[in-house]
Image: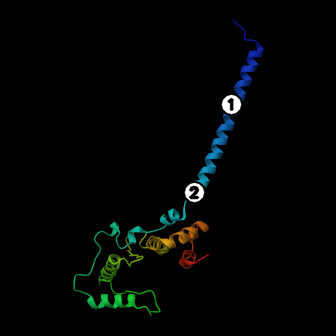
Amino acid sequence: MRKTPRLAVEFGWSLYLEFEIIHDLRAKRCAAISRVLHYLAHRLVSGIDALRDHIAPGAFHNSSERGDPPKCHPRTRLAINQAIVDWIEDGQRTCFIKWLYGSAGSGKSAIAQTIAEMYHESRRLAASFFWSRMAARRNSEEWLVASLAYQLGVFFPDMLDHIEQAVERDPSIFSRSLDAEMGSLSSNH
């Protein structure tokens, strides 16, 4: 049996230990770098991406989720539609929300869809939100403000930077009250 000189064994063992230590350090360093990159990737998500995660695209007037939405038949509900158009066009109005109410099946969605399509075709519809008790993200106020802000940012590109900055400044804005969300996304801070 051939004996390995003791110096060679110690030298080999020392190299092995050094390799293990270097390998372990590299693995730890890689893991640490990976954690930092993961943190930065989540931290550097743009405001528009964060906003997009909190919208209800199915609530948009032209969403494929809504299929073929109800509309007013031609030459029906003319008086109601005209009253809404008059209210929209009234530059002197003091109230900027129109509440359309009625019993189930009375045509509220059809009227709203008809008006939305009319203003969309004339490139004057900035945003819409069609509620639904049965559809996820359309049955809760949680998605309302972000959905409207997103559409407003698309319609008014100058607003998009402001909205994006507001979300980047406070990424948890979507967990706040409607008033806080609206205030943060519409203020000029």
Indicate the position of residue 99 as horizontal and vertical percent values: 40, 87
Q: Amino acid at mark 2?
A: His
Horizontal side, residue 114 vs residue 170: left or right: left
Q: Residue at x 64, y 38 (%)?
A: 27
**Extreme-right residue of the structure:** 7
Indicate the position of residue 13 as horizontal and vertical percent values: 72, 22
Q: Residue 42: which numbered mark, if any?
A: 2
Q: Quadrant of the C terminus?
A: bottom right
Sooner in the amino-acid sequence: mark 1 or mark 2: 1
Q: Residue at x 29, y 73 (%)?
A: 69
* Nearest-to-viewer mark from 1 and 2: 2
Q: Residues within 10 Å of mark 1 (few under 14, many from 20)?
A: few
Q: Is residue 84 above or below residue 143?
A: below
Horizontal side, residue 189 vs residue 100: left or right: right
Give me the C-alpha separation between circle 1 and circle 2. 33 Å
Indicate the position of residue 131 as horizontal and vertical percent values: 39, 76
Colouring chosen for the image of the structure? rainbow
Q: Is residue 61 above or below residue 35?
A: below
Mark 1: secondary structure: helix
Q: Amino acid at mark 1?
A: Glu
Mark 2: secondary structure: helix
Indicate the position of residue 5 as horizontal and vertical percent values: 75, 12
Q: Is residue 104 above or below residue 41?
A: below
- Residue identified by numbered label 1: 20
